[in-house]
Structures are given as C-alpha cells and as structure tokens.
Image: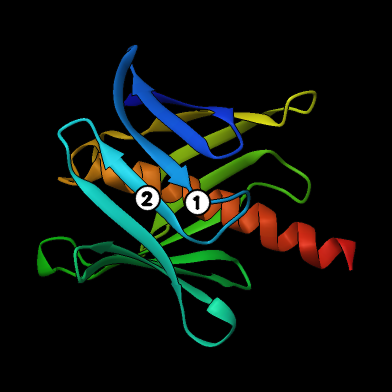
Amino acid sequence: MANYIANSTNSLAFYLTSDNEKIGELIYEKWYASNAEIKTTNGSKFNLKPKGIWNSKIELKDGEKTILEFKLGWNGVLIKTFFNDLEESFSLRIKGFSSNKFILTDSDKNELLVAEMDTKWNNLNYKYSIKTTNEFESFTNKNVMVLALLHCINYYIYITTIVSVK
C-alpha cells in the first residue's frame, strides 16, 4: 500500500507526491479545460485530449499512441488502459451520493485506490489524499495512472457540476 498527496497551488496545476517525494504534475491549459499535460519527474510528458462527439471521451497520449482513455458512464468514469499493448478496464466512482471520496476498481470490482478530496474554497485549491492497494502498486505505469485519475476526478466534478447547475 502507498499514500499519495496531490496538491494544487492554483487551479491549473496539481503536484503529486508520495513520502514527500515529487512524482509528477498535472497541468491544465486553462481552468476546467479538458486538455492537460502530465509530466513525470523522470522527464516523460503525456497529453490529455478530448475526442469524439461533444468531446465525450478523453485520451491520454504518449506521443501519438493512446495509452489510456476515459468517459463518463452511468456508474462513474469508465477507464481503459493500453499500457504495454494490454487492454484493461477500470471504473472510478464516487462513494455515496454527496461524498468527497472516489474509488477505483478493476473489472472484477476489486478496490485498487481511494482518493479523498479536500477543497480549500477560499482560494480554490484542491488537495487529494490517495491510498492505493498493493495490487495497484504493482502496476508498471502507476504514477502516470494516478495523475490521469486526478484528471478523471476533476472531469467528473466539472461535468456533474455543469449538469446540476443547469
């Protein structure tokens, strides 16, 4: 098991750490945009871009290759990964109706990760406390996946907020 912390210092960037060691960052072009960039401490860069009708799907690209995609479904965010040319499916859902906890499960409904959000409304900064299982920690691309999951959560919050306001 591992614990991660994702902090935003403004509404455009999140910094991911574990044991006070920086792992990477998620950077948005503009506030609540679908486009974003992931940078890891080893120098790798990935791009998150919308695709499809009404930008209904978001893809994580490593150059031109899609390595992860997600879209909203009835039960949360449906995620497919294509790391190492192996397709896997996951689901990210909110725990309860008005909770600040998100749970990632695999296709067998095994819990892999819990992310708890703490919003600082006075300055619109966010903090996520993320706890993972040993199974999740065995993933080769776990750091990129955690950063992509932050984008999934932010996307979910953005879309559900728009729908509830209208």
Q: Quadrant of residue 75?
A: bottom right
Q: CA distance from mark 2 to mark 1?
A: 8 Å
Disc 2 + disc 1, Cβ < 8 Å: yes
Q: Which residue is mark 2?
A: 37
| Total number of numbered discs in the rendering | 2
The foreground one among 51 and 128 is 51
Question: Residue 29's mark?
Answer: 1
Where residue 23 appears, as percent x and y from the top left, is 28, 28
Please rate how many residues cluster around mark 2, counting C-alpha atoms within 10 Å: few if below 14, some from 14 to 19, many from 20: many
Please rate how many residues cluster around mark 1, counting C-alpha atoms within 10 Å: few if below 14, some from 14 to 19, many from 20: few
State whether residue 81 appears in this view.
Answer: no
Residue drawn where x is 57% and y is 45% of the image: 102
State whether residue 59 appears in this view.
Answer: yes
Residue at the left extreme, as displayed? 84
Asked which secondary structure carries label 1, the reply is loop
In the rendered view, tell whether residue 53 sits above or below residue 158. Answer: below
Left or right: 39, with 70 as reference point? left
Residue drawn where x is 67% and y is 52% of the image: 157
Quadrant, the N terminus: top left
Asked which secondary structure carries label 2, the reply is strand
Quadrant, the C terminus: bottom right
User: What is the three-letter code of the residue carrying label 1?
Assistant: Glu
In the rendered view, tell whether residue 97 sits above or below residue 134. Answer: below
Left or right: 148, with 96 as reference point? left
Residue drawn where x is 57% and y is 50% of the image: 30
In the rendered view, tell whether residue 153 sits above or below residue 125. Answer: below
User: What is the three-letter code of the residue carrying label 2?
Assistant: Glu
Q: Quadrant of residue 80?
A: bottom left
Left or right: 60, with 41 as reference point? right
Residue drawn where x is 41% and y is 41% of the image: 26
Residue at the right extreme, as displayed? 166
The foreground one among 48 and 89 is 48
